[in-house]
């Protein structure tokens, strides 16, 4: 039993039977009051009729009546306006600071056992990734789930804008630079996000823009700055990149990041930093003003096409310099990866742009992009599908990821619309 649950029960009046105080007076709740999350009584502005007399004031909720004394309320005048003390277990009599005895409602007499059982089930730590409310989700009305998912999708995008804000501050409000850094970060995937971001920060966008019509030079500049062109190479291609990099370097003050920062383990060869840097070089060459380019696009297919860049031909049969791969395949970013870049990088950036510009249209455009993209497929989404929640698009899969990460994993069932429906109907 927790105080948060008892507050929830009181707030939503999930009570059974005719209520009476501990001294037998009938209780009618006319208004539960406003939940107060700051100091002072738990509910302000309640209205209750006790034994035929109507009272207006505050309500305090505790697990045991004796918590009143333990929390020091008997000497606190701020609690003198408590008209009802709501407790789970009445274990003693208490007094207000002014000497009166507050009326007490003992909840355990009015809580249906199935409500407590449902609450227990929701609060049980999830085992083996099973959704705690999995067996009840199907009974929740679709319109409730749908409107909650709409809210969760926006919540998820808004949460992601926090990381974007930090980059925006660092770039002193430069949207193009923020976009370039952010895209670089996401090109690195989970494993190489940081070195990719460092690479972008160490390589001035204006310098890259100078070579925008020459993808090989852009690749040379990025590979060189990545610290991947140091040493001797057998193949002509890396030697060409080395020469290009040295030529660019002569006229600019460039300091490569350490080549040792890149990670190759736990990732598929097609996502090796060498391949990703080459693809990123082609993206930068395709658009030196990526932010403005993306801002002008409304068609998600066009965006996917822009992100789905192919690495240089050398990488068709290489994953690393000087090592020939067993198979020859063109190394595109891939449609799915391009969609993830839009979901995880562009959508939060566009949403934040809408927030900062005070322009609702950009925020709506960001959410609309998610609705145009297919739902993601990963372990979390599969768990929701197993209990009957099938996301129709990326907005809904993002909503389910938010639900899992921000609510289910933190046992926030009392703040969840699905949880409310489950508890309400017990
Ligand atoms: S947070 Fe909501 S969806 Fe998640 S387990 Fe609790 S009730 Fe279910």
Image (cartoon, rainbow, N blue to C red):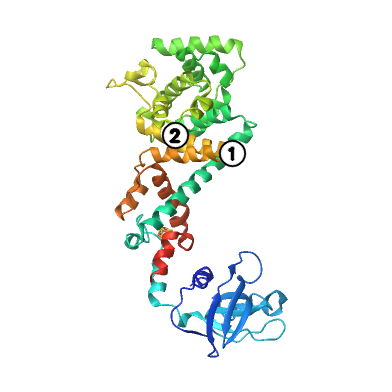
Q: Is residue 265 above or below residue 36?
A: above
Q: Which mark is residue 348?
A: none
Kindly give the residue lying farthest to the bottom in the view shown. 24
Q: Looking at this view, is 368 or 402 the one in front?
A: 368
Q: Looking at this view, is 311 or 6 the one in front?
A: 6
Residue 36 located left or right of residue 214: right
Q: CA distance from mark 2 to mark 1?
A: 17 Å
Residue 226 located left or right of residue 72: left
The answer to whether residue 199 of the structure is visible from this angle is: no
**For residue 40, which quarter of the picture?**
bottom right
Q: Is residue 382 above or below residue 219?
A: below
Q: Is label 1's Cβ within 8 Å of ligand 1?
A: no
- Give the residue at mark 1: 165
Q: Is residue 174 above or below residue 359?
A: above
Q: Residue shown at 61%/29% (left/top)? A: 174
Q: Looking at this view, is 303 or 382 the one in front?
A: 303
Q: Are marks 2 and 1 in contact (CB under 8 Å)?
A: no
Q: Secondary structure at mark 2?
A: helix
Give coordinates of residue 2: x percent, y percent: 51, 70
Mark 2 / mark 1, whichever is N-terminal = 1
Q: How many marks?
A: 2
Give coordinates of residue 111: x percent, y percent: 44, 78
Q: Quadrant of the C terminus?
A: bottom left
- Give the residue at mark 2: 342
Q: Secondary structure at mark 1?
A: helix
Residue 141 located left or right of residue 356: left
User: Which quarter of the rendered image does ligand 1 occupy?
Assistant: bottom left
Give coordinates of residue 170: x percent, y percent: 63, 33
The answer to whether residue 168 of the structure is visible from this angle is: yes
Give coordinates of residue 330: x percent, y percent: 32, 21
At label 1, counting other C-alpha atoms closer than 10 Å, the crowd grade (few under 14, some 14-19, many 20 or more) is some
Q: Residue shown at 57%/13% (left/top)? A: 249
């Amino acid at each position: 039993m927790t105080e948060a649950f008892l507050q929830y029960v009181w707030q939503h009046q999930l009570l059974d039977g005719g209520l009476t105080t501990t001294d037998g007076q009938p209780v009618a709740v006319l208004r539960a009051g406003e939940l107060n999350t700051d100091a002072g009584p738990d509910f302000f502005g309640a209205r209750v009729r006790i034994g035929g007399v109507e009272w207006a004031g505050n309500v305090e909720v505790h697990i045991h009546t004796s918590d009143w004394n333990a929390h020091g309320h008997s000497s606190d005048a701020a609690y003198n306006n408590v008209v009802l003390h709501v407790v789970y277990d009445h274990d003693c009599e208490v007094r207000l600071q002014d000497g009166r005895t507050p009326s007490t409602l003992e909840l355990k007499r009015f809580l249906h056992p199935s409500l407590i059982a449902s609450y227990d089930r929701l609060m049980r730590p999830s085992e083996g990734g099973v959704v705690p409310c999995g067996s009840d989700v199907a009974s929740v009305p679709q319109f409730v789930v749908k409107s909650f998912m709409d809210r969760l999708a926006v919540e998820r995008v808004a949460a992601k804008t926090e990381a974007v804000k930090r980059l925006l501050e660092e770039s002193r409000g430069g949207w193009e630079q923020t976009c370039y850094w952010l895209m670089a970060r996401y090109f690195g995937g989970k494993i190489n996000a940081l070195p990719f971001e460092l690479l972008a920060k160490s390589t001035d966008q204006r310098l890259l823009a100078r070579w925008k019509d020459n993808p090989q030079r852009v690749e040379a500049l990025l590979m060189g700055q990545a610290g991947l062109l140091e040493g001797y190479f057998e193949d002509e291609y890396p030697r060409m990149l080395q020469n290009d990099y040295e030529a660019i370097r002569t006229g600019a003050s460039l300091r490569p990041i350490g080549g040792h920062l890149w990670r190759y383990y736990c990732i598929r060869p097609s996502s090796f930093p060498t391949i990703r840097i080459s693809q990123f070089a082609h993206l930068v060459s395709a658009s030196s003003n990526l932010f403005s380019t993306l801002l002008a696009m409304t068609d998600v297919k066009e965006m996917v096409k822009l992100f789905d860049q192919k690495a240089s031909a050398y990488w068709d049969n290489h994953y690393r310099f000087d090592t020939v791969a067993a198979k020859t395949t063109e190394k595109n970013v891939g449609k799915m990866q391009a969609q993830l870049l839009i979901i995880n990088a562009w959508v939060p950036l566009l949403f934040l742009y809408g927030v900062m510009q005070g322009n609702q249209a950009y925020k709506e455009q960001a959410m609309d992009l998610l609705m145009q993209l297919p739902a993601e497929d990963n372990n979390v989404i599969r768990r929701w599908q197993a209990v009957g929640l099938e996301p129709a698009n990326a907005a809904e899969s993002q909503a389910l990821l938010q639900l899992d990460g921000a609510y289910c994993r933190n046992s926030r069932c009392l703040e969840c619309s699905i949880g409310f429906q489950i508890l309400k109907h017990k």
